[in-house]
Structures are given as C-alpha cells and as structure tokens.
Amino acid sequence: MADELEELRTRLAARMRQLNIAPDDPRIGPLFAQVQKLMREPFMVEDGVHSVRPAAPAAPGFEDGPASPLAMANLPAGPRALVRAYIDEQSAHAWYVHAPALSASEAGRSILQLSPADRACVAVAAYLAWTSKPHGGPCGAALRRIVSDLLRAKLEFDEAQVLELIKGAVHEGFCYSSYSPNSAVANVLKRHVETRGLSPAVGEALAGLRARMVHSHADHSSEGRKLIAAVEAMLANEDSSVEAAPRFRSKPDAWGKAIEAKLSTLAPDVRACLTQLLVLASQGGDNAKPAKGWLKAAEKALASVACEHHGALLLDLIECHEPGVNIAIENQNTLRALLWLAAMAAPTAATRRFEAYAQKCLTFSSPHFAYLSLVLGNAAIHAFTLMPDTLGVGSLARLKRRLKRPGEIKTVDKALAALAAARGMTASELEEIGLPDYGFTADGATEVSVGPARAVLMITDAHALETRWRSADGLKLSGPPAAVKEAHAAELNALRARVKEIGETLAAQRLRLERLYLADREWPLDLWRARYLDESLVCNLARRLVWAFQLGERWVAALPEQGGLRDPSGAKIAVDGERTRVRLWHPMQSTVAEVLAWRHRLAELGLTQPFKQVHREIYLLTDAERSTQTYSNRFAHHIVGQHQFRALCQARGWNCPAFGAWDPGNARPHKRMVERGLQVEFWVDPVESSMPNETFQFQYLTTAQIQFVTTKNEPIALEAIDRVLFSEMMRDADLFVSVTSIANDPTLADRDGEFDGYWSRAASGELTESGRTRSAVLADLLPGLPIGARCRLEERWLVVEGRLHTYRIHLGSGSVQMGSNSQYLCIVQDHKSAGAQVRLPFEGDATLSLILSKAFMLADDDKIKDRSIVSQITRR
C-alpha cells in the first residue's frame, strides 16, 4: 500500500507540472490533504488483512532514502540533534504548506547559530534528504525550509559538497522551483562556478544534471526552463576564456528563429550593432525591472548608435514574438530587456506599438486559465516609465481603461505612480499634465493632410470624435476620395489608427474626471483653468460639469459658460484668481433646492453631462446603519449573476474573486483606496445549487453586508466615513445589484420557485436611489416626448397607455406588466431602440434608455411585429 501511495503522489505531482497547476491551488488542497494523511500511516499486512499502525514520532523523511543515511552520518552529533528537533516540531506540516522560518522556532534558531561550516553541512544533508523522496516525503516542508533559509546566507561550500548537491539534484530531477529549494541550490552552484571556476569534476556533474533534466522534460514548464538556463550558463563558463568577444545566442524557439532570419536580411554593420544590443538585452532581463547598472550600460550603448533607426529595428524584432506562443526562458528575458531598450531608443515610435503589444500579452486565455504572457505584458507597461517627459502617460491611461482585471490595473497604477514620483507629483496630477494635445485647437478641431485631401477631426458635444473630409480647395466630401484610398492607403490607415487612439483617450478622460470624487482633488483657480478649461481634450467635458469655487469661507457652485462662471439662476459670479480654489461639485454638498435648480438650469441650456452629476444619486446614512455602526445591510439579500457581477465590479475598479468549487478563503469583492488608508468590502456568498458541472463556478451569488476597513482590516464606523465617499461607494453597490440582479433576466420569470420568490419581489419591488433618480428624470422628460400624453408616473412604475392594453414598466428593473392582473410581459432588449434617440441629461444609464425604448414600443403596441411579443399580448 505504501508503494502504491508513493506512486500515486509521484504521478500526481508530474501531472500537476504538466498542467502548470500550483501546489497551493485551492481546488486540489483537499486532495493533497487526503494523500498526506495516508502517507503518514504505514500500512502492513497481517494474516492477509490490511491493518493500520500509528506513525513513529521520529522524522522518517530525514532518515529514509538512498542518500540521507550517508549524509546524516557525516553530520556532527550536535547539528544532527538540532535538525531532528526542528523536523519533529514541524512534522504536522504537509509538503505543500510553507513551514515557518527557522527564526520562528527555538530549534530553528539554534540551527542558525551554528558555525558557517556546520550550517553548510546541514544544508547539504537536508537537501540530500529532501531529494531522496518526492517533494521530500512527509517531512518535505521542514527540509525545504532548512535548505532555503541556510542557503540564503551565501555559505561557502567545497567541491565535495557541491558535487553532493548536484548528485541530489540529479536524483530529484531538478525540474521545478515552486515548493522546492532548487532555486537556492542553483544559486549556490552558480556562485561556486563564478568564484572558483568550472573544474572537470563539477563540469561533468553539471553535464549529467542537464541530461537528467532533459530526460525529465524540465523544459515543459517555465520553472524548469529557468533551471535549465541556469545550468547551461554554468557550463558556458568552460569556454568563456576562448571567446574574446561576446556573441548573442538565441534559443531555437519560434521567436529565436524569427529574429535570426530578420538579422540575416540586414546589412553587416547594422546587424553587428543590433547584435551588440541583443547581447546587452540578454544580460538585463532576469528581473521584473531593469537594474540601475544595466540602465547605465544601456544609455551608454544607445549613445553610440542612431537611436531612432535602431530603435525601430528593435521594435520589429520585438513584434516577431506572438504572445501565447511558447518561448524559452532565456529568449523571454532577452525580449523583456529589448522592450526597455526600445523604449529608451525610440520612445515616440514605441508608445502606440507597446500599447497594443501589452494589451495582447495581458489578454486572459480562459482555456489555459492564464494570460498570454504576463511577464512580457508587465515589462511593456514598465517600459512606459523609461520614456522621457510624459510621453507614456496617455498610453497608460488608455490601458487602464481597457484592461479589466485588478492585477493588470494595479500594474498600470504602479507605472503611473513611478512616473509621478520621479517628477515629484501624484499620479492624478501626472494624468492631468500628461495628456497629448494631438494638435487640437481651443474649438476642439484639428486638420490632418492625407494625400490631396484633408481630414478635419472634430470633438463633438457628446465628447466623441467626428471625421469630416475636405478636398484640397476646401470643398466638403462625404468621405476619403478614391485617389486617397488607392495611392495613400498607408497614410489613411495611420489616420484611422490615430482617430481610434484619440477616441480612446477621450473616453479615458471621462472616467478620470468621474474618479475625482474618490480622490477629493482641489486646484488653485489658475491651475484649474489651464488643466481643464483651456485643455483641448477635456474642455468639452469640463464645460458641461458643475464646479465648486471657494469664496472666502464658503463654497459656491457654478457652471463654466460663455462669458464666465454662472450660478443656477444664470447670474455671473466673481472669483479671485489668487485665493480661489476649485473642486468638482457633488450634490451631497448642496441643498435639495439648489440641486433641483441646477437640474432646471441644465435642461434650459440643453446640456448633456458626460456622467451623472446634477442627477447623481446620493446615499445618506440611515438609522439602521447608525445602529449597526460598522456595516450596512442596505443592499443585502439580493441574488445576482456572478459573471456580470464580477465584470461590473472590475469595470468600476473593484477586485472581485471568482467563486466556484474551491475555497476562496476570506476573499470578497473590495475596492482599495490607498490614499485614504481604507478599503470598502461588499460581502457575497455563492448560491450552492447554481453550479454547472462544466464550469465549476457558481452561476449566482447572494449579497450581504457592506463595510469599510482600515489597511489592517479593522472595521471603521460608518459615521466616520467622508459623506461623499460613503455615498459614492453605496452608489457602486446599488449599481452592482440593480444591473446584475436576476430580476433583470426575463427568462427567469417562469423559474420563480427556484429562487423562493426573489425574482417577483425584485422585479417589482421598492425603488433604490437609482430608480428614484429615473423617476425624477422622466418627470422632466415626459412632457416633451411624442408619447408623453399617453404616459404617467405612478410610484415605482412608468404607466404607458397602449392602443391594445395598459402597461407598467418598473423604474428599477425595467420589467413590464400589462393589464389589471399585472401579467408579466417578456421583452428582450433591443439595442437599436427609439429610446436611444431621446436626449438624456446625462450619459451612462442603460436602464433608463431601455425603459424609454420599451415605452415608445408599447405606446404603439398595435404596430409591434415581433412574434414573441405579439403572441403574449394576443394570448392575454
């Protein structure tokens, strides 16, 4: 039985490495716990029946195996006793669990106090014991900790000890580094070869180790490829004295073959120069960020070449790599450093190309449950920090908007923070001053010549980009002329790429301005004018928002209009440029009367705001929340779709784990606000009965409490939270629930019993703040609509008098009931609806647009042609 269990664990570990599954993956934790429990109980046969006897208290993993008895015999009695004591202390830890550091236990501290020579002997003996069984056997966690902690001190090893380490590595296979001391051993071997040279005996042993690694298929994983590269680097010392000049040797994978072919087409002098840069890159990409010494060497090397020309060639070499295709670890490290070199050599040409490359590398592959290339994607993002001035800020802002996963966004935030810190400012300030102007004038227009024609790019009132064409003599054209399409296709494609980039930059600025509420930013008046009213890319946004101006001890809200700043009545306000400060106005900071005045003022001016501001929902602390003190149940007990919920969380900057057939621990949806020293958490639980067998993820979640905690995870009283911040976080929670609730799924109407009546209650329940805001907006809109005479508001419903029936549309969920018996009417959303043609006072409320589109359709219900809707109406 013991042999069968040993074989099971060996095969399981091999299969894990093949599938790139980490030992601490929560999905397999229970399985390993079961195997570990069985391994601790020796089986023996008595009278033909299997019986179990308790395991001995000694450390069997240290004394069993072909190598460990000899190693233990060479240890002095004192160190041997200390090692045995430490292993006995940690015997409860499974091999896949990290044992505590040596410094955390009395026996471990005694081992650290041994002489360097004794510690070296203990490290060798522990490694040999660890390699004698898969993962070190039952005591693998303790043995791994002994080796790793001792080797961290850079001990001196003689050649005999080095050969013992190599023999142990050969026996184990040396194929992976996670949950093993193999990386620490590789560093010891590397240090020995670098300081003492490669002796024939060590060289022969390392060659045997490499052969063993190839036989064990170490190159099938990134960890194994890295270890192979380390062994090959040691073996390369054998002929280093023969080579006078360094040569670049790429590994023969797809990228290595592609760049060799590319280099062969270049002139000899250009090829020689690029080869030198490739050699430099091969020495600088071992870590996530370039070392300071390597950066100095790179600057020196680039000073002697034609940077722009050679930088463009480096970009071509980089793009020979297709993210997602297997690449040798050495080539990956070289490619990582090439990204940094190209950013330094040709930053202007690199920005847009790196942006596309980073986004492709950070594309998440669901079948492989991994990014196409996380290492190279992060390296491309870091490359923007090496560009001069603020050249990379626009690309980082666009990436931050397009990337969805919190890990990717965090990497972009770190890059922005690094750029800001280098300039002595905050990341928010950097985003303000780092905007490219693209040549736009104050009226939001710029011209680009494309062959014999001119393209006029205009920023519209909706903050979108419109392209108008003119001939060389100024005549208006409906589009690019045929001569441009045929003879200037490259210029036309470049223009289209530029238009796309500008459009993405405009969209990113709208999100940036809305995030100002969380940052609580203020500016001196002159600085605000320069960065907002006079900035061509954001002035269209800024002039459609209400701002607050500090006049003495009070704050006054005003709208930038033609001729100055005006209050809700249209009266001009006077400001002092030296003492006045400005911030983005929030309705929480004004009275109800003033908010209503601003709504009427914007309606008179016909302004559509880039996001909800004067109609923004506000959330005041309730008596129930004062009673609970540190948490809110305002949005508890809802059932939401997990996929939509997680997607919306990530879009709003929240981190939301996946819930499935594994233990997520204490992970829950949360949003960190480092500048405020807190985070907000929205507790959820999976609906246990909603897991499809093919995905292993729960389909639905139930919502629970919301709470604010410090960076040390200590609850904060809700009354101590800034009122605007509290309102904004509650607004996010309201958005998550109202958009992703199953009440919005019309297909669930007939499956009500599955959710204990929740669908019926939520689809027609009391309105939240977002629903009440829609009611207020519709009250202003209905009189001016063609169907206004046939519509009215009743509590939480928009009532529509059709020609065949009377319909009620819920202002929270958008669900429809008809007739006096409130029969449910299933209508699937039509994105090309009449509601989209109605001018709304703000952008971004898809549910309000959906309600209007249903109202327009149902008002003329005798003209509906959709068979599924007609059958429901006539069947009634």
Image: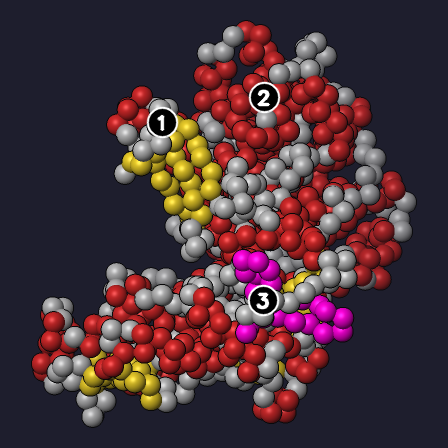
Compare marks 3 and 2 and give the one earlier in the sequence.
Answer: 2
Residue 763 found in image quarter: bottom left
| Discs 3, 2 touching: Cβ within 8 Å | no
Local secondary structure at mark 1: loop
| Range covered by the magenta-colored residues | 549-569
Task: Residue under label 3, please give it.
Answer: 566
Above-or-below relation of 789 to 449: below
Question: Which residue position is annotated with label 1?
Answer: 472
Q: Nearer the viewer, mark 3 or mark 2?
A: 3
* Residue 78 on the magenta span: no
> How far across and down, in percent of the image, does residue 876 sit?
12, 85
Position of residue 408 measured from the top left corner of the image (x, y, whole percent):
55, 51
Q: Which residue is mark 2?
A: 308
**In the rendered structure, which disc, 2 or 1, sits on the residue that comes first in sequence?**
2
Q: Main secondary structure of the magenta part?
A: strand
How many angstroms separate mark 3 from mark 1 (CA)?
42 Å
Q: Residue at x 32, y 66 (%)?
A: 838
Residue depicted at x 25% and y 64%: 833
